[in-house]
Image (cartoon, rainbow, N blue to C red):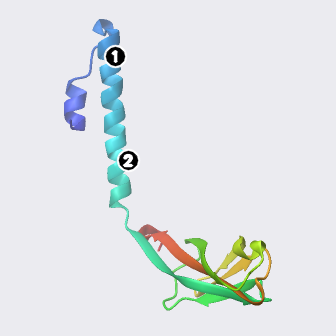
Amino acid sequence: MSAADALQNVIDPASATPATAQQTANDAKALATAANNRSIANRNIIRTFGQVTITGTATSQTFEFEEEQPNATYNLVATPTGFTGTPVFEAFVPVTIDKSTDEFTLHVSDAPGTGNSVTYDWQLRRNDEDE
């Protein structure tokens, strides 16, 4: 049902019954959901991804982008996906990410330890309208 059809079929409150009022509410919710879905679908989400590894006694690692970002308002998610040796648990816990237009630095709660490393998959997301 289009918005125009919905407006033409609006029930007069004076003659509404509980059933027609519920149907009107259901129609309004369906229209709002469809409009929201179109809005989300029309956004062009830009994604960049890669891996960064923190090794030994380091508690952070910097990753330089191949292509500079237009600003540092992007969303960056880092997830531990692999390790070598027996890193301490806290090495799997990201605490902060410092962002700039040409790089980001991932900081973890504790270093993996000598001879150990933790690898993170990362994904950068931004709306093209953020550029």
Please say if 119 is above or below 22: below
Percent x, y of residue 112: 76, 83
Residue 89 position, x and y percent, is: 76, 72
Q: Position of residue 20 (x, y in %)?
A: 29, 15
Most distant residue in the front direction: 85
Label 2 secondary element = helix
Q: In which quarter of the image is the N terminus?
A: top left
Q: Answer with mark 2 or mark 1, whichever residue precedes in sequence.
A: 1
At 35% from the left and 11% from the top, the residue drawn is 18
Q: Do the residues labelled 2 and 1 touch (CB within 8 Å)?
A: no
Q: In this view, does 33 lie above or below 96?
A: above
Identified by mark 2, the residue type is Asn
Residue 109 image-quadrant placement: bottom right
Using the image, determine if residue 123 lies above or below residue 41: below
Q: In the figure, residue 105 lies in which quadrant?
A: bottom right
Q: Mark 2 points at which residue?
A: 36
Q: Can residue 73 be seen in this view?
A: no
Location of mark 1 (residue): 21
